[in-house]
Amino acid sequence: MATVAEIIATNPGALAAIAQSLTDKNRNVSKAMDQMRRDVDTAMDLWRGDAAAKASAKGMATHLKGSHITTAIDSQIEAIDLASRTLTSAHDTVVDWNKQAGTAGCAVAPDGHVTPPTIFRPTALDTSKMSPTELNIVSALLLAQASADEKARTIESHLLPAVRDFNDSDTAAAAALNKATDTVADLVHDPKSADNLPPDFQPILDMARGGHLPYQDDPRKFHEWWSGLTPAEKDKLAEINPQIGNIDGMPAVDRDHYNRLLLADLRAKGGPGKAGYDAVAGQLDGKDRFLLHLDDKGRAAIAINNPDTAANISTFVPGTGSKLEGIAGDMGRCERMLTQAKRAGAPDNTSVVCWYGYNAPPEIPDARDAAYAKAGAPALDSFQNGLRASHDGAPSYNTVVGHSYGTTLIGWAASKGNSLDADNVALVASPGTTVYRASDLNLTGVPHDQVAQHVWATTSRFDPIHLEAHERGTLKGLAWVAQNPVAAVVAPPVAASEVIDDYKKNPVGHYGTDPANAAYGGRTFTSDTVSPDKAHSAYWDIDNEGKPDERPNEALRNLGYLIANKPDQVH
């Protein structure tokens, strides 16, 4: 145990400088590894075949191992930084009260016990023979001694706990640092390679070869189990199942690593889906991107910033015609939502996920088939549950944003016996959510009688989606267009108005009540009025983007408020 004198002699504040220096060095290593990964990706654009696939996999495996080391070093940094903060606090308290003890003439024992000075402590006192003056002197001395004793007790009541706190923090910090250092040593020397795993891990490997892992259908339990594995064990499981990074509940860092390995392999193999995988690779340049999902069926999910450490998270679900080849456009929408959210007050580490985790209807006529929503809903529910399971610290504020058919998928994922784990949903240009009222939806953690207050919607006045959201009104509008074909071409807003005039009376469409209509019972927000030919995709537009007078679509501005959890500023 450190004594008072030893504690005073320490300088725990210096640990903060050590942690910062180590952080800088670790970041440089990470940057170098990321550059290596980008160089490999560039080479893959010009190299095909089995040898290319093996070389790519080797490069990504090397990057993965290096990332495991930098992650372990991050744990060292966290231990040092925590030690700096906790030890500094206890150290300063010891110094302060020890100084007060010296000023009061007290003696401080090595363990923090305090002895008051002896002013007047007689073993026996006969006051019967004392004069009044002597009695006054004795009384004054006794009061002075009592005051000194009380001062010593006060000092000791602060000094003893501070000494204990310092030593407890020192022990805890040492244990955390030793654990992190041992992990780094194991990774560097690799004593437990993937070919030398403990015998009791063999049943898990057999299970993986059968296409399953413990708790993979329960994100919270899976996260807890996965967190107890060694890097070598994780790598071996990834070797057996290259798509392991898609299991919800796995930390974002691990998902990203294993899915990047898979991406390199899929790109090297070529084939009809290569253009989509190349498009995904094109969105991963930058350390703030995390590949949370990738499979061989054309599905993916990319997060901007790490959702595991974000206080606010938004998941964007696109609509009809969404294919990986076009993911750049929706990533742009996600970047704009992130920018608006930060302007609205969301933290810089806010994460926005572009979720291409379902097979969207390929063409507009296909969007009248609910089968796509039904098939994709379980994946969205599981993904949202996974974000909760792998999140660090206090629960994040999660918003799910859907566009067009993506809102129909959200509706299915939050109804039909399902519950969507989100604090808010925002439905943009929705053809309907398969239910008739917002209160028919289920949001995990939101009391059912309050759900409608967490369901938001907007549809621009001339958005053609009204043709789906209001069938009876549509018939009237189409009848007007048929009777006035020239006017419909010359003045399309007039034609659209014929639909709009009737939809408030007839708010029910193919997929239930229009969420942007009052009859749905949710909350609405404004969006710009745009011509019919542009209205359905203009919600994320910004006029004069990048200039001092830039102006985002009101829908985009409002989405920023929702993601930032500023509903009172939505209009």
Image (tube, rainbow, N blue to C red):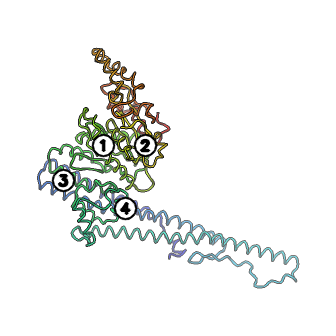
Residue named by callout 2? 424
Residue 478: percent from left, percent from top? 31, 21
Q: Amino acid at mark 2?
A: Asn
Q: Earlier in the sequence, mark 4 or mark 2?
A: 4
Residue named by callout 1? 374
Residue 490: percent from left, percent from top? 29, 16
Secondary element at image label 4: helix
Picture disc at residue 265: 3
Q: Amino acid at mark 4?
A: Glu
Q: Earlier in the sequence, mark 1 or mark 2?
A: 1
Q: Is residue 80 above or below residue 454?
A: below
Residue 36 as seen in the image, left or right of residue 105: left
Front tag of 4 and 3: 4
Q: Earlier in the sequence, mark 4 or mark 1?
A: 4
Q: Earlier in the sequence, mark 1 or mark 3?
A: 3
Secondary element at image label 3: helix
Residue named by callout 4? 224
Residue 42 vs residue 64, the one in the foreground: 64
Front tag of 1 and 2: 1
Q: Residue furthest bottom?
A: 124
Between marks 4 and 1, how big is the CA–CA gap?
29 Å
Secondary element at image label 1: helix
Q: Amino acid at mark 3?
A: Asp
Residue 268 as seen in the image, left or right of residue 311: left
